[in-house]
Amino acid sequence: MRLRLRTLAPAALVVLAALPLAACGNSWDRLGDIGKSPKLSSIDDPTAKPGYKAVSMPMPAPTPPAYAPASLWSQGSRAFFKDQRAHRIGDILTVQVVITDKAKIANDTARGRSETESTSVGGLPGAAIDGLIKKTGATSSNLINNTTKTSAEGTGSVDRSEQLQTNVAALVTQGLPNGNMVIEGRQEVRVNFEVRELIVAGVVRPEDIGSDNTIESTKIAEARISYGGRGQITDVQQSRYGTQFLDVIMPF
């Protein structure tokens, strides 16, 4: 046993020493940014980023095109003149992000149960048996006495209120066979030593795009909206990597 502990001790020290390095990740890179403003992300093609995946959605059966002879109206047009709204890959439209979520839930549960059992036996034969019963502290009229009482109470409540309202320009990254479009928009704003980042992605219908080339976030299917930041203030608001690691592995 001692030999095994001696063998495991160096390995455990190596693991403990490597944990901070693995947890910090980009901490070494951040050392070079001390005293500097956080860098903004470069403007790249969203489809060329690592981890990008094309969206695959259920599509209706294709319908054969119908042509009207001697007609000035093109099939699929939403206006007589050229439509300026986004409809092709690379076009830009404005997403009006409006999130107003409120949830209030309250639950109160109470439960109780009480049971009493008593067993008596009269006229037990023999003095020896009667003496044995008396040694246990029981009597023939109260041979078995069992009392059970349980109670449980539970109270839970949820009171949440979130509100976000802003605009972000999004890029059409993919066109689906049924005419819907996949969009993705990213906006970064740096104020002093803090960067605020807004990401919007999802699937939109051309019919939901307004005449001013805008669309509400509530009309985006499979919407993915992220609003956060990075910088000195965000670092202070987060726990250190060691604390986060202990919060995960500690059972109590």
Image (spheres, rainbow, N blue to C red):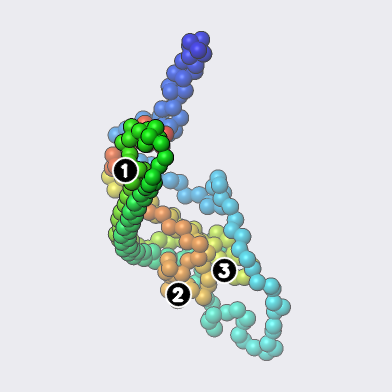
Mark nearest the camera among 2 and 1 is 1
Q: Which of disc 1 and disc 3 is earlier in sequence?
A: 3
- Label 1 crowd bin: few (<14), some (14–19), many (20+), radius 10 Å: some
Is residue 17 or residue 143 the one in the foreground? Answer: 143
In the image, farthest residue toward the top: 3
Q: Position of residue 21 (x, y in %)?
A: 43, 27
In the image, farthest residue toward the bottom: 70
Q: Is residue 164 above or below residue 17?
A: below
Determine the image quadrant of residue 108.
bottom left
Q: Position of residue 97 (x, y in %)?
A: 38, 64
Q: Is residue 203 left or right of residue 162?
A: right
Q: Which residue bears the numbered disc 2?
A: 210
Q: Which residue bears the numbered disc 3?
A: 180
Determine the image quadrant of residue 226.
bottom left
Q: Which of disc 1 and disc 2 is earlier in sequence?
A: 2
Residue at 62% in and 70% down: 178
Residue at 46% in and 30% down: 22
Q: Is residue 185 above or below residue 86?
A: above
Type of amino acid at the residue the image marks with label 3:
Asn
Q: Which of disc 3 and disc 2 is earlier in sequence?
A: 3
In the image, farthest residue toward the front: 126
Tag count in the figure?
3
